[in-house]
Amino acid sequence: MFEFETLLTLAAVAAGAGVVGGVLAGLLGVGGGIVIVPALYLALSLTGMDSALTMQVAVGTSLATIVFTSLSSGYGHYRKGAIDMGLLRLWAPSILVGVVIGGILGGLVSGKVLIAVFATVAALVALDMVLRDGGTGSEPRSFAKPVWAALGVVAGAISAMMGIGGGTVCVPLLNFLGYDIRKAVGTSAAIGFVIGVPGALVYMATGFGAEGLPPFSFGYVNLFLAAVIIPLSTSFARVGVKLAHSIPRRALRLAFGLFLMLTSLRMFSDLAGL
């Protein structure tokens, strides 16, 4: 099932996902998982691998790459002054709790459930980003700390289940709460690290000993695919950061929303074909 030609094909798909995912990580603060998960899912499904494991491996591997991609993207945005460090400190603990919850659920539930969650959340976020005007960022809305904590848990749980760095949920949420789109993108890029580390560890643990996994897998994280993606995604994240700070804010929101809608439609199509 996993002959040399198959591994070569997987590596080519992973390389492409790493380049595109890296650019989008810097541009949209999404960690790259929104590209990497469906790309790996499609590539692994062509190998004849058990469909029940395909989505788990795609999600777990994506989270492992996000650890490094978010560091590169987050540092770039930090140098541009586009990260709200106060919000990051406030939100990190609750997001961490949500990641552990979402990671455990993602490692245990059916792959079909993960695909449905991924596609549904992506579609809702896409509609919000395309149809609603963004905030100016002049006066972010204020909530009590328990409310922020609850939002963080939800964002972390959904992100871990989807195998993404948090931007898909956090960027539109922060923008809705009044944050400038660029600061929302920058802060979400940094949040990706908070999500990636525990998320990848949980997927490693829940997939330990599972049968039928691809070669070089550690639980639901495939080290071979991660090794192909990480150098490319971290390098091209810097390109995305430069783009994010050079194009109009409305164009940034439209790019984010349209890409998510295409991704959602693709995942719904895959779900219908299962």
Image: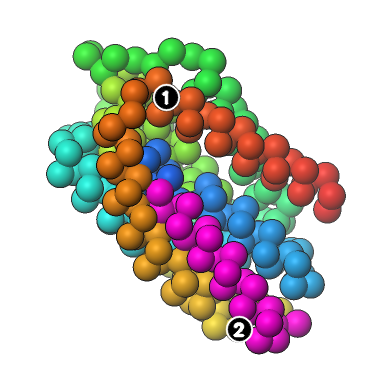
Left/right placement of residue 244 relative to residue 38 reads left
Q: Which residue is mark 2?
A: 215
Q: Any magenta on residue 8?
A: yes
Magenta residues?
Answer: 1-23
Q: Which residue is mark 1?
A: 251
User: Local crowd at mark 2 within 10 Å, few (<14), some, or many (≥20)?
Assistant: few
Q: Position of residue 162 (x, y in %)?
A: 55, 49
> The residue under label 1 is which amino acid type?
Ala
Left/right placement of residue 183 relative to residue 105 reads left
In this view, 181 is above or below 11: above
User: Local crowd at mark 1 within 10 Å, few (<14), some, or many (≥20)?
Assistant: few
Q: Is residue 199 visible?
A: no
> The residue under label 2 is which amino acid type?
Pro
**Residue with the most extreme right position:** 273
Q: Nearer the viewer, residue 97 or 241?
A: 241
Q: Residue at x 39, y 16 (%)?
A: 134
